[in-house]
């Protein structure tokens, strides 16, 4: 396939399998100006699928850089009212959304004050987005568009053809019918989640170089996968690619040390965090270090009182189509689906029985973390063993030598 064929096939997959747009449904596409060709392709695919209306909202990272550099401190976390209202309208209308990532200039913010970069996030909008995810009020999907800047970060040269090939393999785009291939893949992940739920685990233990971490689970923690469904019953696949099974842990019961196994790209902040290490005590990350990007990471985690607690644990083994490419994508959407990961910040109430009806304070009291941030980082790989811990203290191998054991 030539480049344009890949773009059109990718757009069709995004619309039909990602957000699973329904006839008569609204679609909001959010991205940066460099991704306009793909946003247009998604719009074409959406209208072909019967969209009532498609709106594309473009951001500009250079404008964002100017804001971080010069705006008053209070503007860094401010949400313009019209953007907050737009998000609320999407939920009210039972609409769909697509977020296109793939940083065209990964080092753009590297010369800025790390504290301001880490602080710069629209907090009200993030809180509303987390609410919508937990309440399942929007059919959403995140995808990534290959570009030369991203290719440069990955390969050391702007080899766009090579990046397109890697992305296409990771998202099953070379299949004759990618949509059907993804539906079969979702069923496989669902079976893994079901197997974990049958074990009734009390926790997980991770061991490997620089890692000896125990994460407690809640009695109501349910393992989930890409089998997402809105509150009104519309199935969708939030992340393309996705290779994980995940759940929400007990925020109070994380202890030990963990070392990242892949670079973490904070795309919104334009920063790469390398060699990230954390030490947890009583659920809280009490030490955070990295060879680069540590200040940005610490500032982000200190956005609110709960930003240093875990909100997600996710398991991925070497069967991952993303991992099989052999590429470190330096893009969290892809890298988190190449290997196991955890996330600091907000937990998912829909992954804990009975948590959906709780207020934020009640969620925290029940052990479900509530925060305005949610940041994944990769901690798995061939040298990391992951075991399940039962209520009576027995251990069950889950991933050993990067291979699923159940």
Image (cartoon, grey):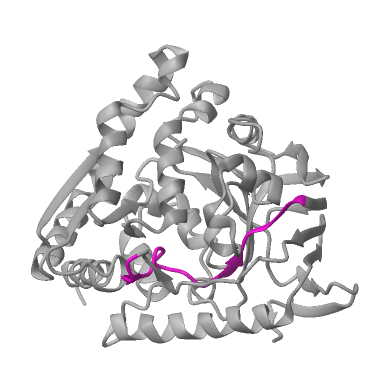
- The residues colored magenta run 232-252
Q: Confirm whether residue 70 shows in the render.
A: yes
Side of 303 where 202 appears, left or right: right
Kindly identify the residue that appears in the image at 35 percent across and 56 percent down: 137
Q: Quadrant of residue 336?
A: bottom right
* In magenta stretch: residue 250: yes
Vertical comparison of 174 with 242: above or below: below
Q: Picture quarter containing residue 21?
A: bottom left
Q: Image height check: is 321 above or below 272?
A: below
Nearer to me, 304 or 33: 304
| Rendered position, 247 above or below 150 | below
Is residue 136 depicted above or below 132 in this figure?
below
Residue sitting at 35 percent across and 69 percent down? 236
- Residue 245 location, x and y as percent? 57, 71
Is residue 143 on the magenta stretch?
no
Q: Which sits in the foreground, 291 or 229? A: 229
Position of the N terminus by quadrant: bottom left
Residue 293, percent across and down? Answer: 61, 35
């Amino acid at each position: 396939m030539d480049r344009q064929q890949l773009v059109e096939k990718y757009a069709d997959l995004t619309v039909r399998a990602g957000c699973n747009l329904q006839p008569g449904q609204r679609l909001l596409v959010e991205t940066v100006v460099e991704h306009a060709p793909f946003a247009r392709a998604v719009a074409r695919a959406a209208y072909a699928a019967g969209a009532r209306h498609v709106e594309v909202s473009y951001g500009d990272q250079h404008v964002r850089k100017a804001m971080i550099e010069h705006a008053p401190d209070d503007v860094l976390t401010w949400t313009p009212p019209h953007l907050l209202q737009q998000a609320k309208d999407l939920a009210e209308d039972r609409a769909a959304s697509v977020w296109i990532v793939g940083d065209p200039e990964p080092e753009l913010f590297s010369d800025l004050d790390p504290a301001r970069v880490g602080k710069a996030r629209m907090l009200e909008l993030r809180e509303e987005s987390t609410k919508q995810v937990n309440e399942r009020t929007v059919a959403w999907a995140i995808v990534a568009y290959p570009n030369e800047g991203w290719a440069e970060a990955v390969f050391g040269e702007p080899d766009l053809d090579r990046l397109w090939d890697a992305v296409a393999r990771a998202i099953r785009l070379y299949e004759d019918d990618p949509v059907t291939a993804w539906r079969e893949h979702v069923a496989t992940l669902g079976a893994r989640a079901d197997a974990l739920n049958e074990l009734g685990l009390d926790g997980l233990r991770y061991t490997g170089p620089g890692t000896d971490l125990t994460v407690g689970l809640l009695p109501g923690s349910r393992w989930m996968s890409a089998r997402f469904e809105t509150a009104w019953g519309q199935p969708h696949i939030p992340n393309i690619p996705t290779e994980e099974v995940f759940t929400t842990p007990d925020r109070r019961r994380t202890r030990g040390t963990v070392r990242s196994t892949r670079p973490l790209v904070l795309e919104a902040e334009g920063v790469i965090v390398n060699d990230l290490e954390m030490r947890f005590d009583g659920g809280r990350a009490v030490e955070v270090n990295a060879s680069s990007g540590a200040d940005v990471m610490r500032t982000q985690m200190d956005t609110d009182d709960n930003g240093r607690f875990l909100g997600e644990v996710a398991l991925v083994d070497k069967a991952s189509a993303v991992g099989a490419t052999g590429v470190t994508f330096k893009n969290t959407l892809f890298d988190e689906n190449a290997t196991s990961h955890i996330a600091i910040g907000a937990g998912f109430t829909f992954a804990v029985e009975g948590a959906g009806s709780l207020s934020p304070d009640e969620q925290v009291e029940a052990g479900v973390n509530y925060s305005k941030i949610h940041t994944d980082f990769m901690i798995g790989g061939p040298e990391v063993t992951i075991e399940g811990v039962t209520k009576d203290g027995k251990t069950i191998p889950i991933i050993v030598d990067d291979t699923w054991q159940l």
